[in-house]
Amino acid sequence: MTPATRQEVLGLYRRVFRIAKNWQSASGQIEETTREKEYIRNEARTLFRKNKNVTDPKLIKQCIEECEARIEIGLHYNIPYPRPIHLPPMGLAHKQGRTLRHQERLRKISKPIYLKSHDEVS
């Protein structure tokens, strides 16, 4: 990791924790605000620790883009949780074979950047 990339990642980490510190839930309830702040901190710790040994520059860039997208979406909608996506179910493909693999590949490609690591953590 280059020093510039390292500084960018550390800056994102600090930014996420500043957002968590000043977070206010949409409902304004203290319990919900506390729960959402804790979720933001835990999610950041988990994802940053999971990716701390990543050395591939393309993968690092993808993780940075995902983090920035989740920050912007969270601030815009005032919801710290990832926005759900609605992909068609895999009910039309057979249990095995080319069609199933093709459909799985299409589902993986169509997944938004802000949810790339969400299924791996949850």
Image (tube, rainbow, N blue to C red):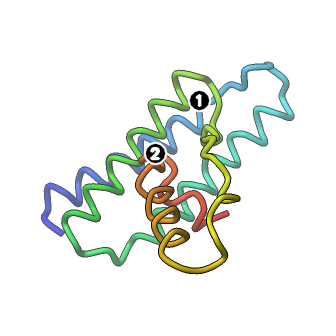
Q: Position of residue 9 (x, y in %)?
A: 31, 54
Task: Write down the residue under mark 2.
Answer: 112
Quadrant of the snapshot with the C terminus: bottom right
- Answer few, some or many: residues within 10 Å of disc 1's Cα (few below 14, many 20 plus, some between 14 and 19): few
Instruction: Find out whether the residues at labels 2 and 1 contact each other: C-beta distance under 8 Å.
Output: no
| Camera-nearest label, 2 or 1 | 2
Give whichever of 108, 114 is nearer the camera.
Answer: 108
Q: Is residue 56 above or below residue 26?
A: below
Q: CA distance from mark 2 to mark 1?
A: 27 Å
Regarding mark 1 in the picture, which secondary structure is present there? helix
**Residue type at mark 2?**
Pro
Residue occupying the point 48% across, 43% down: 16
For this rendering, which residue is in front, 68 or 98?
98
Q: Camera-side residue: 60 or 110?
A: 110
Q: Is residue 64 left or right of residue 20?
A: left
Q: Amino acid at mark 1?
A: Asn
Task: Point out which mark residue 22 bears.
Answer: 1
Q: Which residue is pictured at 50% across the width and 38% down the height?
A: 18
- Local crowd at mark 2 within 10 Å, few (<14), some, or many (≥20)? few
Q: Position of residue 55 (x, y in %)?
A: 24, 75
Residue 4 lies left or right of residue 25; in this view the side is left
Question: Residue at left 13%, top 65%?
Answer: 2
Question: Which of pointers 2 and 1 lies earlier in the amino acid sequence?
Answer: 1
| Residue beneath the point at 64% across and 41% down | 84
Residue 108 position within the rendered picture, expressed as x and y whole percent measured from the top left: 47, 59
Check the picture and name the quadrant holding the N terminus. bottom left
**Residue 34 or residue 112, whichever sits in front:** 112
